[in-house]
Image: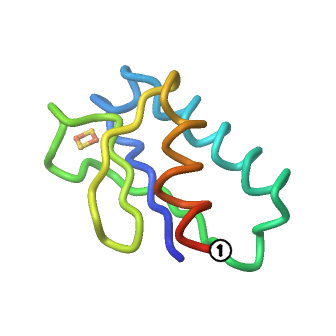
Amino acid sequence: MIVTVCLGSSCHVRGSHHVLETLRRLIKDNHLEDKIQMEGAFCMGNCEKGVCVKIDGTLFTFTPETTQELFQKEILSKLS
Ligand code: FES
């Protein structure tokens, strides 16, 4: 699975750095380093939907507050 976090300026203002750090921690805590490839990207052209996170090419809106929940729902559940 490839998880791409937008690091463009609009998503940055909405907390992309925090989302990225939280995802990294959750991946590590769940020992998923072999299964998930984390990438950063510049503006994905969907700033109004930021923080933009693509999971295997599908765009999702993450916020620092919803990252944990979305990790469970959109990432963890699809790997098991
Ligand atoms: S800055 Fe993230 S989509 Fe534009």
Q: Quadrant of residue 19?
A: top right
Q: Residue 2: horizontal and vertical position, in percent?
A: 50, 73
Residue 62 shown left or right of residue 48 in the figure: right
In the rendered view, tell whether residue 77 sits above or below residue 29.
below
Label tally: 1
Mark 1: few/some/many CA within 10 Å (<14, 14-19, 20+): few
Q: Residue at x 73, y 47 (%)?
A: 26
Q: Amino acid at mark 1?
A: Ser
Q: Quadrant of the image for the C terminus?
A: bottom right
Q: Quadrant of residue 59?
A: bottom left
Q: Residue at x 59, y 63 (%)?
A: 38
Residue at point 39%, 57% (across, down): 41
Left or right: 22 as drawn, with respect to 49:
right
In this rendering, the answer to whether 10 lies above or below 75 is above
Query: Could you say which quadrant of the image residue 11 lies in?
Result: top left
**Disc 1 secondary structure class:** loop
In screen coordinates, is 78 left or right of 51?
Answer: right
Quadrant of ligand 1: it is: top left
Query: What residue sits right under mark 1 in the picture?
Result: 80
On screen, residue 40 versus residue 36, left or right, reads left
